[in-house]
Image (tube, rainbow, N blue to C red):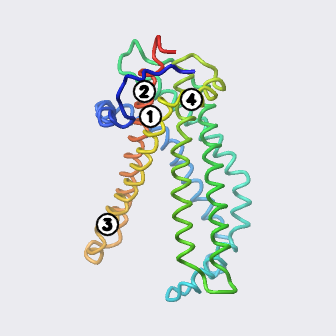
Amino acid sequence: MATSDAHVPIRGTQLLVEHMSSVFRRPSLVAIEIAWRWLFGIPFLFFCFEQGRQILSVFSLESSGFNSIDTQNPWVAATQIGGVIAYYEPHIRLLSRWLLPVAAVAWIVVSGLGRSLLLSRLQSAPGSRLPLRPMPVLFSQAAWLALFGVTVWCWFRSMQWVSAGHITIAGEPNLIGFFIWAIFLTLGFFTAWALVSWTVSIAPLLSLLENRPAISALGQSLRLGLPLASKLAEINLVLGIAKLTLMVLAMVFSAAPLPFSDELGPAAMHFASACSFVFFLVADDFCQVVRLKAFLEFWKLYRGPGKI
């Protein structure tokens, strides 16, 4: 169990600007994060695009009824879109049975190696850099993916429950109740994810800094003590909110040229959307590095040499 310094009057986000500045001065850290994410993401998206094109070449949009969707009547359109989804669902399920496990293994390997390199370079002094040990990071990334999958599955099931209770074929749908529950549950799952996901994010640092096996580091992340755990959860929650803000900014930037769409043309609109998407990805990767930097500094404060 960690013994924390109770006389340190510091909040989790008090030094966040300093951590951001530190990461901003070392662009190589963000470059590593971007490299491993895009090394996986670009081939994965390209492969999904090719698989989708193959499905559409056999089962065209016309045969699914997509082209006949009534855009003037939202209720009729919702039913028609549901029919399109049901039409393609068996083919997507068949593809997902082997694609998702393969993609999960590929993501664990690529992210584990990339994060291992990033963590080894997180400390600025060459003599104090962390050892390059990919295996504990691979295990932590697998635990993160499993926890993320469970969270998304629970959120999806909750949305199904809300839909079944408020949108029925027999009567008029209760849209107000549906959106209240949907917003409440979505924010609830987002908050829950921010409050628990830091445990799998700090685990590789514990393994490298304290020379622990991967399973021991993951177990220790649940027993860090309230003072340190509260700081890590606060950092995780604030940076999660920052991610939502970045999403809103990206949508605003992509929609900014809409009043001039007739003059600019579709190519310029697509370019603006692509730039906004890249902006969000790079800014999100920056926040990921800042999170790890903050975790490292709080470990030094609460569990550094001579404090555990």
Residue 52 picture quarter: bottom right
- Give the secondary structure at mark 4: helix
Q: Few, some or many C-alpha atoms within 10 Å of disc 3 (few <14, some 14-19, many ≥20)?
A: some
Q: Nearer the viewer, mark 3 or mark 4?
A: 4
Other residues around mark 2 within 10 Å, as few (<14) / some (14–19) / many (≥20): some
Q: Which residue is mark 4?
A: 203
Check disc 1 and report the residue beneath it: 231
The residue drawn where x is 55% and y is 36% is 111
Q: Which dot marks residue 268? A: 3
**Marks 3/4: CA distance?**
44 Å
Q: Which residue is located at x 68 percent, y 51 percent?
A: 99
N-term-proximal mark, 2 vs 4: 4
Q: Nearer the viewer, mark 2 or mark 1?
A: 1
Answer yes or no: do the residues labelled 1 and 4 have beta carbons within 8 Å?
Answer: no
Disc 2 and disc 4 in contact, CB within 8 angstroms: no
Tag 2: residue type? Phe
In depth, the one of 200 and 38 nearer the eye is 200
Which kind of residue does numbered mark 1 sit on?
Answer: Lys
Disc 2 to disc 1: CB gap under 8 Å: yes
In the image: residue 143, left or right of residue 119? right
Sequence-wise first label, 1 or 3: 1
Earlier in the chain: of badge 2 and badge 3, it is 3
Residue 43, position as x, y percentages in the image: 54, 48
Q: Earlier in the sequence, mark 3 or mark 4?
A: 4
